[in-house]
Image (spheres, helix red, strand yellow):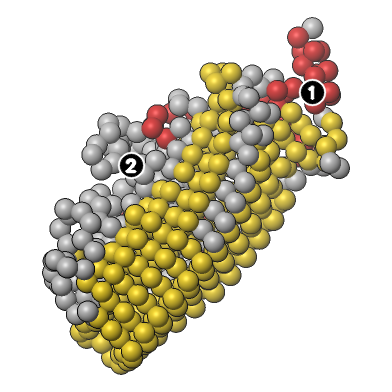
Amino acid sequence: MKKMMLTFLMLLAVLPFMGQTVYDVTAFGALGDGRSDDASAIQRAIDACSSEGGGRVLLPRGHVFVAGPVELKSNVELHLEATAVLKAHPDEGKYRLSAFGANEGEGMMWIYANHAENIAITGRGVIHGNGIAFMGAELEDSYELKPLNPQTFDPRPHVLTLTDVKNLTIRDVTIREGAYWTVHLIGCDGAVIEGIQLLNNLKIRNGDGIDLDHSKNIRIANCHITSGDDCICLKNRREFEQYGSCRDITVTNCVMTSRSCAIKIGSENMDSICNVLFDNCIITASNRGLGIQNRDEGTVTDITFSNIQMDCRLWSDVWWGKAEPIYVTSYPRANGNHKDANWRFPKGQIEGRCGEVARIRFFNITATSENGCFIGGDTQDKVHHIYMNNVNLTMRKQTAYEGGVYDKRPCRGEGFVRGNVHGVCVDTASDIFIDGLNVDWEAGFPNRGFAHDEKNVQRIVVRNDFHN
């Protein structure tokens, strides 16, 4: 009798809405009581929707749907009504699918899709990663990571892991409290991420906001992102090398806060990252503003940053970065001593090399920071043709953390470079062109240096610089 009633309710739930069929998860058995695991019921709704030609899977308002792993499928719109919450189940044992394929060292999947098309995640509801449930003790500057046996995987669930998805839309939803990476696009082609609130706990390490990995034709606009780790990161991880380069990407009208780097390219990059525009963004209280951190053999070329306002400050050494507003580097990563070293270097190797970073442009950049900009590589030909036009820096001491340090991690050898704070420090590069550099040191700023300082640089041109 109960099974017949559930089937009847499922039939009632499949109703047309604005030209598409709607599959209400409560009619498929989801309770939404904030305690029960509703993953199976949500999966039944998704499977029915996809198999019957597509439509909208509805999480209705006023419910908290706790769930373990859920797989999205082709032609499905997952829609969360206002006040609906989809929350990751806190039981670590439920997460057994690696977010990085054969590399099980760095987290598991929660909401995921593989080799699909026409997927959308929409609505005014909340996707809640339940991040603190997977953390250790709270520290002053972060949450402690639970100890892992070297033979076991990291059970922390990534929020969204979308692999080889074509025509993807993520719009209007709020995504909160990820335990690891939040929105990870792998080999995706044609995605729009617009108008979302991505609000991670700033103390959770590895809490990246949006990671674009071997993906292309991506548009991100009008988003608010807070993340302990990088807010928006472009990369090419070795686990997914079959998907090729990361390219043809625009990011506009976003507001970001990070304890690591707000906008980062790298550090994992075994292919090519190119043809990228970041425009009209605001960065607040971040440990680094705009960062290119090339640490593998891949290349980074033809990147433009324009019309960006930044406020950078120092955080502890738990987080990479030393408040550099602009950071353009290429160094070989440290030799293979990481928990997943077999994936950081080419197969069979424990030592890597770094590729070129070239034709990087910065236009109309304004920053207040405890540090200056840093440009450098391991040889002069690795970082070249860097253009800075109308860059305005205000050097202001805001914290008690030690200043006068640039952060080169992860790299071979010394990870920190100590010295005076310059507006722009260039160390080992070529063809650097700076036009319109304004540096204002506020009274009492320690470790004060010069507007620009360079060593081991082949060809640098500086015009119209001003400093107080």
Placement of 303 over or under 90, stated as above or below: below
Residue 424 in the image, given as x and y percentages of width and height: 27, 77
Question: x, y percentage for residue 358?
Answer: 42, 80
Q: Please state which amino acid type lies under the numbered disc 1.
A: Met
Q: Are marks 2 and 1 in contact (CB under 8 Å)?
A: no
Residue displayed at 32% across by 60% down: 312
Tell me the SS state at disc 1. Answer: helix
In the picture provided, is 447 more to the left or to the right than 13?
left
Residue receiving disc 2: 203
Callout 2: SS: loop
- Give the mark count: 2
Image point (21%, 75%), residue name: 422
Q: In terms of depth relative to the viewer, which is nearer, 114 or 453? A: 453
Residue 385: x and y, percent? 40, 85
Q: Is residue 218 visible to the viewer in this orientation of the structure?
A: yes
Q: Which residue is mark 1?
A: 10
The amino acid at mark 2 is Lys
**What is the number of the mark on residue 79?**
none
- With 37 as the anchor, is 105 left or right in this view? left
Question: How busy is the neighbourhood of tag 1: few (under 14 within 10 Å), some, or many (20 plus)?
Answer: many
Q: Residue at x 23, y 39 (%)?
A: 140
Question: Which picture quadrant has residue 403?
Answer: bottom left
Report which quarter residue 402 is drawn in. Answer: bottom left
- At horizontal 79% and vertical 23% (from top left) the residue drawn is 10
- Of the image marks 2 and 1, the number of the one nearer the N terminus: 1
From the image, which quarter does the N terminus lie in? Answer: top right
How far apart marks 2 and 1 lie (CA) works out to: 42 Å
**Image coords of residue 316 (percent x, y):** 22, 51
Give the camera-side residue of 236 and 435: 435
